[in-house]
Amino acid sequence: MTDQASGVLDIRADYMAQVRRKRMMDGIILVVFIALMVTGFMIADDRNAGGFWDGLHRFFDFPKEVLSEAIEKIGELPANLLKYLPSLIETINIAAASTLLGAMLGMLLSLLSTRGMAKWPRLIPVFRRVMDTMRAMPEIVIALVLIFVMGGGPVPAMIAIAFHTAGALGKLFSEVNENASLKPVEGLQSVGASWAQRMWLGVIPQVAPNYFSYALLRFEINIRASAILGFVGAGGIGYELRNAMSWGKGQYDDAMAIFLLLFLTIVAVDQLSSVVRERLTHGKNQKVTT
């Protein structure tokens, strides 16, 4: 009995020592993080043309100027909305095409990097590192390289967003795959089905709702990304926004119309995709009648 009690005390002492070490490491990481943030802010503030605190009182000057001009020309707002509607449609098309291509490639990479489903199990680490690399590369960097090679337009933006989307969705899809049952796959394999048939008939029906849910979420993100890439010449409504803002005073009513279009579109897509994702993952809410 004494030996058992001493063993319990030893386990407790080891556990408390691990807790203390974890708390100490967490504290060190927090201190280092705060120090890096403060140091980075100080360096950025020193290299800036004007100090952050010195220019803080002018933070709202530009939005105020844009709003005042937009209010003065409020009568031109409907015409401006119609004027930039084709550019908005182009942005949505870029986001939709890149989401579709990225989801298809991400699905393939996720199946190739999931244990129990991979066609070449030894290459699972390779496919996972490929997805890590695709996620790590920002869309704007890829777009800038492609614009230099291919010239400005929506195609570089689509390729850049699709590349990053494939890595991001591939990671999410692989996590979904791990929760899928392998019994249908084993059954199909026993009757001589190919790898593609096993995945398409045994795995995809199980994970399709979650796949579609994640793809819709990524579509929302890609709309914002495609608008941002327009600032570097990748087409879409972001390109029009950059032009309107670069002209300065006199074109701020156009910039406000573009802001409004983007805001309404993102809100609408966000609400619609939230409803669709909710129904996909949880099904329709059944009304209880009494």
Image (cartoon, helix red, strand yellow):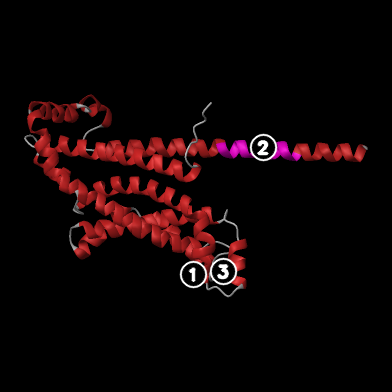
Q: Amino acid at mark 3?
A: Pro
Relative to residue 93, is residue 33 depicted above or below? above
Report the magenta residues as a range.
14-26
User: Dot 2 surroundings within 10 Å: few (below 14), some, or many (20 or more)?
Assistant: few
Q: Quadrant of residue 22?
A: top right
Q: Position of residue 206 (x, y in %)?
A: 53, 55
Q: Main secondary structure of the magenta part?
A: helix
Residue at 90% of width from left, 40% of height from top? 3
Q: Quadrant of residue 263?
A: top left
Residue 35 as seen in the image, left or right of residue 175: left
Q: Residue at x 47, y 40 (%)?
A: 284
Q: Amino acid at mark 2?
A: Val
Q: Are marks 3 and 1 in contact (CB under 8 Å)?
A: no
Is tag 3's residue or tag 2's residue first in the polypeptide sequence?
A: 2
Q: Residues within 10 Å of mark 3 (few under 14, many from 20)?
A: some
Circle 1: residue type: Ala
Secondary structure beneath label 2: helix
Is residue 20 visible in this depiction of the protein? yes
Q: Secondary structure at mark 1?
A: helix
| Front-lying residue, 289 or 35 | 289
**Residue shown at 48% from the left, 39% from the top:** 32
In the rendered view, would you say 217 is above or below 97?
above
Which numbered disc flags the more N-terminal residue, 3 or 1?
A: 3
Camera-side residue: 44 or 91? Answer: 91
Residue 21 drawn in magenta: yes
**Which residue is more in the foreground, 2 or 130?**
130
Q: CA distance from mark 2 to mark 1?
A: 48 Å
Give the residue number, with chain letter if any, for mark 3: 121
Q: Which circle marks residue 19 in the picture?
A: 2
